[in-house]
Image (tube, grey):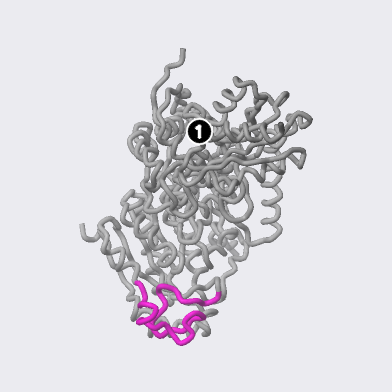
Amino acid sequence: MMKRVFMKGTEAIAESAVRSGLRFYAGYPITPQNEIPEYLARRLPEVDGKFVQGESELASVNMVYGAGSTGTRSMTSSASTGISLKSEGISYCATARIPMVYINMQRGGPGVGTIHPAQQDYNQATKASGNGGFRMIVMAPATVQEAVDMTYDAFDLAQRDRNPVLILGDGMLAAMMEPVVLPEMRTEKEVQQLKEEQKEWALIGHAHEEKKSFIVPGYWSVEDQEKLCIENNAMYQRWEEEDTDVEELYLDDAEIVLVAFGMAARITKSSMEILRQEGHKVGMIRPKRISPFPKKAFDNIDYSNLKAILDVEMSIPAQMVYDVELAVKQRGRIETYLRSGGEIVRREEIIQSVHALIGEEK
Amino acid sequence: MESQVRKAVYTRTKTLNGNVLGFCPGCMHGTVFKIIGELLEEMNIEQDAACVLGIGCCGLAQEAVAYDVTTAPHGRACAVATGVKKANPDTFVFTYQGDGDLASIGLAETMHAANRGENVTIIFINNGIYGMTGGQMAPTTLNGMKSTTTPNGRNPEEHGSPMHMCEILNQLEAPIYLDRVSCNTPRNVIKTRKALKKAFQNQIDGRGFSMIEIVTSCPTNWGASPLKCLDFMEERMFAEFPLGVVRDRQEEE
């Protein structure tokens, strides 16, 4: 049996990253994710990795731009307003096709907001994590175990696509302790091998006869720039087919379908279970990756049974609801239950909202 | 008659790939890239080299150099160089940045990379103006000098006075070599070459942070001929930015 350990979300993510092959981290302090840099400041030297406390979010993300350019598994992390500062570097990584992973432990926003959990960065994470309309795979864990597993995989996806991958958590996931099974530690040889595989394009120096590394966040030629955008878009389209990740529950008989992601989904799911015990036909769609958004899951709803979809978010105004609308294609009614500012969605309020929707129909 | 065996005594550096560099005539960027390339060959480090370009005119070199190259976001070259060097210490890392990039938007990154003593080489081109964007005021624009955003000349009471990056970095503990040179005369080109060679050797020897500030001209945005610009450099630029070693820890030892 795999060994279970009791760990805090931030530290479990950091450990999982190291096990996946993380060897470079740069970050700048911001609550509620400070244990990630603190953990890695201790941990990375043990595996001959490098930790840097950057002088700012800007510097940190650009150190990752540099380290990622060498094919070294690299990561940064921050929270909401700090992520905004990193957005320039993230756009550059996505354009220069640099593999990197970053973590956003969301707090109540906009602005500096509160340090409490929220999901106010959905649009930023999925639509515009920087200028230029690039996209990323965005993972939204609902438990510490999922955060650990997703972080481990994120580095593989980043390397596969040569593109940033975002783990979108929140202050609750960051601070919560749960038992987890940590993934296997990759050996030094395996980590070296993963770096070796990227040698051809990596910014590490090439002999004159070899093809040089050319890692650029833009071109002088409009033809080259358009070509890059077309190539990137083909990758984004491929993700829509091959890289969605979603949990679908009771869609066959559901009269009410709850939609939620991340920590809000965890509370929503337990609300659904209570409602089903009460005898209500309630189902749920939980995007485990919010980008690419699992549109096809919404085709599995039996709309002839459906009374309403309830979009649950820790964001006011609602943000994911626009993706839900695109996926539902006007086949059903969509309502929202929202909390914000660091207020966590409440099970009793979700249940009340569902009761109200069912009651209206009677 | 004996056959003549001809020996090449001078060739173009193979580190420039033949693409047009794109710099305006007389601006000295081309000279600096030639020196860099010749040194990479001479010191046998071309195969290890990674160049981190800033944003601005320096970006024009992106497609003309035949060694590994990346372009950093504006001002972030020292942070990118930090990442490359820490992640892959065997790579020879140098940045190439203008005054707006290094001394204005990138001031924090420059100061902190210097303060950490990163084992990288910083090549800082100071021509006292924003070239690429069309001649706006730089942190190094001389007092009284006109730019498109100081149409009546830089007024120290309103805009502050020019910043002296070698002297500012000289306040820090870690940098090991800070030198200000120019390329306005053949003699100074040779001095620039020597300074860069020393800075490169410092990195190879793992000694730490070196910055070479190269005072250059911008005929296009200074609005003068290249030759007139050379006079202006002698008369005004070197008065503000005196050439010479500001710090050399190796010499002090």
Residue A197 visible in this rendered orientation of the protein: no
Residue A244 visible in this rendered orientation of the protein: yes
Q: Nearer the viewer, residue A23 or B123?
A: A23
Which residue of the protein is positioned furthest toward the right in this rendering? A304
Q: Position of residue B75 (x, y in %)?
A: 46, 61
Residue holding disc 1: A151
**In the picture shown, does residue A326 fall above or below A154?**
below
| Kind of residue at badge 1 | Thr
Q: Position of residue B158 (x, y in %)?
A: 38, 81
Q: Position of residue B220 (x, y in %)?
A: 55, 79
Q: What residue is drawn where x is 40% and y is 85%? A: B144
Q: What residue is drawn where x is 52% and y is 66%? A: B56
- The number of discs equals 1
- Give the left or right position of residue A274, taking residue A331 as reference: left
Q: Nearer the viewer, residue A277 or A194?
A: A277
The span shown in magenta is: B134-163
Q: Position of residue A45 (x, y in %)?
A: 34, 35
